[in-house]
Image: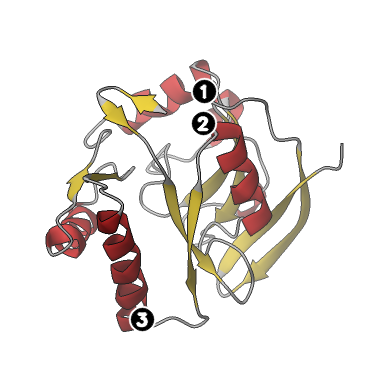
Amino acid sequence: MKLGKFEVTKLVTTINETFERVAMHSVRETLLIRQAEELKLPLHRIKLPHPCSNEIYESCMGEALNEAKRNDVSYMMFGDLFLEDIRQYRIKMLEGAGITPLFPIWKRPTAILAQEMIASGFKAVITCVDPKKLSPSFAGRKFDESFLKDLPKGIDPCGENGEFHTFVYDAPIFEKPINVEVGEIVEREGFIFADVYAKEP
């Protein structure tokens, strides 16, 4: 897949191997596989134990980066927006790997970016809410104009401060949408999670 002057060769994500989900997003591994299929890209899943110390995390990431370098990967892209400590951590992680980090949407105004994503056809559902920052009633909702309108003042419209997390089920770059349904909404370890799953055809 071409992205500007870059050739995207692989998607990379971490998975909680005990629950077979993305840790904070709580997205099922099967849905990540579906996303990759719709993008026509291979998916590299880094399996992490639960619980996972920072040392184990960095060791697992290091192995993945070494493999990427062996496959002649030169760059790694991240979707970070404005959290400088996270950005610096990623830069430090890649220093010894010989891979250059890229931050294509860094410092984009999030209110404008959220509107642009919706207008261009990206469709997502809220899979996780931090109830200390946002009402649990937002869990399971679609990321749309109505959602943005209802967000309280001070909540980042892209959830960059951890207010919420999402799963994208349709996008202009997908071959076809992923037909999803929101199941049980539960509280776990201080967060509210909406269980999203693919509906049978």
Are the residues tagged 1 and 3 within 8 Å (C-beta)?
A: no
Q: What is the C-alpha distance between the residues marked 2 and 1?
A: 10 Å
- The amino acid on which the numbered mark 2 sits, given as a three-letter code, is Leu
Q: Nearer the viewer, residue 112 or 61?
A: 61
Measure the alpha-carbon separation of dots 2 and 3: 37 Å
- Confirm or deny contact between disc 2 and disc 1 (CB under 8 A): yes
Q: Residue at x 32, y 79 (%)?
A: 54
Residue that carries the numbered disc 3 in the rendered image: 56
Q: Earlier in the sequence, mark 2 or mark 1?
A: 1
Which residue was labeled with disc 2? 148
For marks 2 and 3, give the one nearer the viewer. Answer: 3
Instruction: Select label 1 or label 3 by which is in front.
Output: 3
**Which amino acid type is marked by label 1?**
Ile
User: Quarter holding the C terminus?
Assistant: top right
Foreground mark, 2 or 1?
A: 1
Figure quadrant of residue 158? top left
Q: Relative to 167, is 183 on the left or the right?
A: right
- In the image: residue 19, left or right of residue 90: right
Place of residue 57 in the rendered image (x, y in percent of width and height, measured from the top left): 36, 75
Residue annotated with mark 1: 118
Q: Which is nearer the N-term, disc 2 or disc 3?
A: 3
54, above or below 181, in the image: below
Residue 17 image offset from top left, x and y in percent: 57, 73
- Name the residue nearer the viewer: 71 or 21: 71
Q: Is residue 133 left or right of residue 161?
A: right
| Numbered disc 2: secondary structure | helix
As drawn, is 183 to the left or to the right of 14?
A: right
Mark yes or no: residue 82 visible.
yes
Q: Residue at x 36, y 81 (%)?
A: 56
Residue located 31% across and 45% down the image = 78
Give the residue displayed 43% in from the left and 36% down from the top: 157
Secondary element at image label 1: helix
